[in-house]
Amino acid sequence: MSDNTTTSNTNTGSDADTDASTDARERDIRTDGTGIVAPDDETPAWSERKNRSTGLSRLTYEYFERARREDQDLRQESDYVERDVLAFPTWPHEIIRNLAIASFFTGMILFLSATLPPHIGSPANPSSTPAIILPDWYLYWSFGLLKLGPLNPELAILGGEKLMSDRTYGVLANVVVVGVVAIVPFLNKGSARRPVEQPFWAAVGVGGVIFAFTISVYSAKNLIPMNVHLLFDLTFILPVVAGFVTWAVLKTMREGYSYDLNRRYYRLRPPK
């Protein structure tokens, strides 16, 4: 009987010590920038702790962990049923994140400029016109729209003549494309922040990006080792196919994504 009593007292004492140590760790974990940032459900290895101890890596790690804990704590304390709109102060959260991203891209630009310097060709000859004239790469899409002569209809009522010249037709195509790009933000007035929440507009965006690429390739058709008619067809077929595939994939992902989103933000019970 005494042995059982002693064992139970020992277990009770060990449980109390465990609870006390747990409470002490929870008191040390704070989100005001002065405490210890807790790891994400796992104990970091020695090398990870060493990498996080100094420099930008530690600041970045603390920023993401502290932001995650602040978001989690605020959502647990909130009484709202709908999704809460939370934000973080500029310093240190936004500043550290922006510095990390800017430093990464600056380093990549310096690395590429040092390892792959641009080739300087021979000077241009002002007395001869080059065989192929192309604008800067970021204007290839506009230059490709100027070459849409095959789409310029020939009207039988005019005796097979075209209503406008191919050059005018290309300029009109530029106006139409730029107008569509400018009006899309006014048509899509939803509050979605992720493509899976609005598959249609995500498909429109993917199709537009693919079309910008294909029409840019078509603008340099003289340099592409492919049949011109096939290249012309792919210029308009690939954006439609890419947009449809994007819509179909996001549509199938939407149900599971909505459930995960609702379970996180609205605290719904999982379906039985």
Image (tube, rainbow, N blue to C red):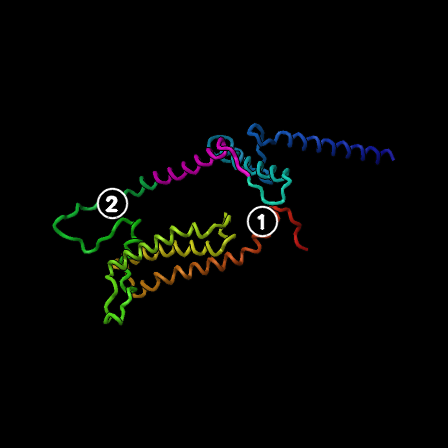
Q: What kind of residue is marked 2?
A: His
Can you say whether 53 is above or below 138 in the image? above
- The magenta stretch spans which residues? 86-110
Q: Residue furthest top?
A: 34
Residue sitting at 54 percent across and 36 percent down?
67
**Mark carried by residue 261:** 1
Foreground pick, 165 / 222: 165
Pinpoint residue 133: horizontal percent, then vertical percent. Answer: 22, 53
Q: Is residue 201 magenta?
A: no
- Residue 211 visible in this rendered orientation of the protein: yes
Pinpoint residue 213: horizontal percent, then vertical percent. Answer: 35, 55
- Residue 227 visible in this rendered orientation of the protein: no
Q: Residue furthest left?
A: 127
Query: Along the horizontal axis of the image, is 163 left or right of 12?
Result: left
Q: What kind of residue is marked 1?
A: Leu
Mark 2 to mark 1 CA distance (whole Å): 50 Å
Query: Along the horizontal axis of the image, is 177 left or right of 267?
Result: left
**Mark carried by residue 119:** 2
Query: Along the horizontal axis of the image, is 31 left or right of 6?
Result: left
Pinpoint residue 130: horizontal percent, then vertical percent. Answer: 18, 53
Mark nearer the N terminus (2 vs 1): 2
Pinpoint residue 242: horizontal percent, then vertical percent. Answer: 42, 59
Foreground pick, 60 / 158: 158
Q: Quadrant of residue 168?
A: bottom left
